Amino acid sequence: MVTPEDIEGMIARCALGDRSAFAALYQATSSKLFGICLRILKERSEAEDALQEVYLRIWRKAESYKAGGPSPMAWLSTVARNLAIDRLRAKAPPADELDDAPELVAKGPTPEQSAVAAGEAARIGACLGELEPERAGAVRGAYLEGATYDELANRYSVPLNTMRTWLRRSLIKLKECLER
Amino acid sequence: MSEQATYDEDDIAVAGEYVLRLLSAEEVATFEARLAAEPALRDLVTDWQEGLATLADEVAEAPPAALWPRIEAAAFGEAPRRAGISPWRWLAGGLVAALIAVALFFAIPPGPVTPPTHQAQIAAEDGSLVVQAALSPEGELHLIREQGGARPGRALELWLIAEGAPAPVSLGVLPEAEDVRIAVPEALRASFTGGTLAISDEPPGGSPTGAPTGDVLAAAPVQTL
């Protein structure tokens, strides 16, 4: 099992130009990061291009990762997510795509709650569970799919301002719950 | 309301929106200007990155095997097919040697003909080597070498690269015969789906390291039928 410390070590060695560390890092993390890109971009070829960009960024910017900041997986996920969202938004989506109701809305109990034992993960799952399902769904949609306020408002058939109010209140509640 | 008094509810929300990428370009600029000056706000951003990243805990999908050589070439600026430089050269370091299982070739008598579940035409770009491969539901890989062969004093070795796995697994050295059937270990059969078959130039008897050491002569994605 690859531990966060292992991944941190791999990133540190990437910063020194260690190619074998880069290969090991890819092996340990590419499924997760590809999954993140694919969730956001939907198309495999797009997600593959994004993943290439992600790892090039990681290879070249490894020295900017600081131990003691976000955990290594959170850092890698943030790089992947941000680059995938950049790509998503660079190509203007056709308007009718917005009508496709996402499967996220209908999902009942969160998979996180049942599957993840680790403290942090279990907490955010439980904390999302304290929100109304639609509001939790909006947070997930924004994080996992890179949905914008416009898209979320459309998806849940509420005015844009209402969506923003919902989401900001949800974030405040979440934070409160996470710190409990 | 936060007790620390270094940030308020609005900061909590806007930091979350920032991490979620929900802010407009203008709002991002304003927020980033504050970030540069306010360490407490930076901590808030880190908290959100951390907390929200766990939402993706269940998200995972193996990327195609062909992607790693592309990334490696782009990162290290190597031409993947130049003579003497194998795209898999890094494997020689033995880093993933533990992951590589070597399957032994052995001839099996032709059995009843069943339609294959997977096939691939493993061909060199210039057509100098062409091998047809078809996998039966029983795990018998039928190989027909239509064009080309091993270089003098060298051998051809067949590799399977599972989807998402940067490391190829040896399926063995190709026998001299043009039409052979080999048994694929059960553990490897599932990896044919979405995988890639490749043939490399190796010393007689096959790669001494368990990873490709010579030129990759031909490769093809496996088609699931």
Image (cartoon, coloured by chain):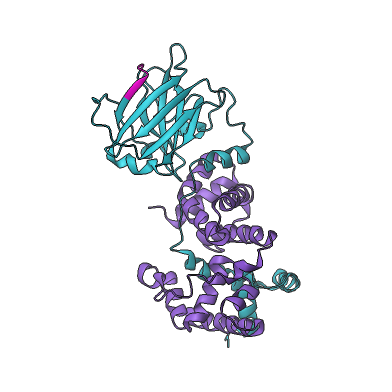
Q: Main secondary structure of the magenta part?
A: loop
Q: Position of residue A156 (x, y in %)?
A: 56, 79
Q: Position of residue B73 (x, y in %)?
A: 60, 37
Residue A28 vertical placement versus B99 (above, below):
below
Residue B157 vertical placement versus A154 (above, below):
above
Question: Which one is in front, A76 or B35?
Answer: A76
Question: Which one is in front, A156 or B215?
Answer: A156
Query: Can you see residue A179?
Result: no
Query: Can you see residue A134?
Result: yes
The answer to which quarter of the image holds residue B205 is top left
Residue A11 is a magenta residue: no
**Looking at the image, how many numbered discs can be counted on the residues?**
0
Answer left or right for B182 relative to A4. Answer: left
Residue A49 vertical placement versus A127 (above, below):
above
Residue A87 vertical placement versus B219 (above, below):
below
Q: Position of residue B3 (x, y in %)?
A: 57, 86
The answer to which quarter of the image holds residue B108 is top left
Instruction: Identify the residue at horizontal 43%, vertical 15% (top origin).
Output: B154
Answer left or right for B76 relative to A2. Answer: right
Q: What color was chain B assigned in the picture?
A: cyan
Q: Position of residue A162 (x, y in %)?
A: 62, 85
Residue interval drawn in magenta: B176-180
The answer to which quarter of the image holds residue A3 is bottom left
Q: What color was chain A assigned in the picture?
A: purple
> Outermost residue toward the bottom?
B1
Instruction: Identify the residue at horizontal 55%, vertical 64% (top origin).
Output: A70
Question: Which one is in front, B155 or B145?
Answer: B145
Question: Which one is in front, B130 or A137?
Answer: B130
